[in-house]
Image (tube, grey):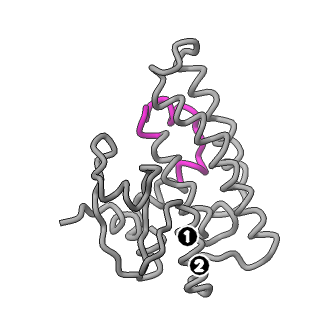
Amino acid sequence: MVLIYANIDFELTEISLKSKPPEMLNFSPKGTVPVLIVDEQIIDESMDIVEWVLNLNPNLGINTQSTQENHMALEIIRENDTNFKKALDAYKYSIRYPEKNIDQLFKETTNFLDYIEAKLSRTDFLVNNHLTYADIAVFPFVRQLVNVNRQRFFRLELKNVEKWLTGLIDSNLFRRAMLKPN
């Protein structure tokens, strides 16, 4: 999404993580996606790609305007990348956690949802009233959570998260990002 937002031309190659091509593993021995190859530089972490784009174009319009907002964005991303992603993976792959039932696993994701619900009660987006890199970093994971069990998610009645999520899903930016490569 950040590459599209920045109007950076790139070639997208869809990868099946169940059958990773050797060429991909040559570039990214971790075998994770995304991987961005620029000239001879390999960037294989989502936030590193965002940082690369922001360094390339600091006036992109998804930067935060103050040190305090930047700190807030990093705090949100850190919480997403640690506790929430761990809880999300456990919930998505609940078969791997037979000691916990699905309701327990889902409950572990709701702390983060409550956290961003509170933030979204004050602003249209996670940091302020316009899209920032925090929204782009967090959105895909909240969307993944919803897609595990939509009814369970919507029973939480997190109106601000729902509005934020719907706005991003309906955005031209997201639609363009979801186009399948030819």
Q: Which range of residues does the magenta coloring cover?
A: 146-163
Residue 123's x, y, as percent? 68, 63
Compare residues 181 and 107 and report the one nearer the observer.
Answer: 181
Q: Residue at x 55, y 85 (%)?
A: 56
The disc label shown at residue 167, or none: none
In the shown orientation, is residue 12 left or right of residue 182?
right
Counting the numbered discs, the total is 2
Indicate whether residue 43 is drawn in magenta.
no
Residue 92's x, y, as percent? 46, 31
Residue 167's x, y, as percent? 48, 60
Please name the predominant secondary structure of the magenta segment in the image.
Answer: helix
Q: Residue at x 41, y 75 (%)?
A: 4
In the shown orientation, is residue 170 left or right of residue 79?
left
In which quadrant of the rendered image does the N terminus lie?
bottom left
Compare residues 12 and 4 and report the one nearer the observer.
Answer: 12
The disc label shown at residue 50, or none: 1
User: Mark 2: which amino acid?
Assistant: Leu
Rendering quarter of residue 12: bottom left
Are discs 2 and 1 less than 8 Å apart at CB? Answer: yes
Q: Residue furthest left?
A: 182
Q: Secondary structure at mark 1?
A: helix
User: Mark 1: which amino acid?
Assistant: Val
Q: Residue at x 47, y 47 (%)?
A: 143
The correct choice, above or below, for 174 with respect to 144 in the image is: below
Q: Secondary structure at mark 2?
A: helix
In the shown orientation, is residue 164 left or right of residue 150?
right
Residue 146's x, y, as percent? 47, 40
The disc label shown at residue 54, or none: 2
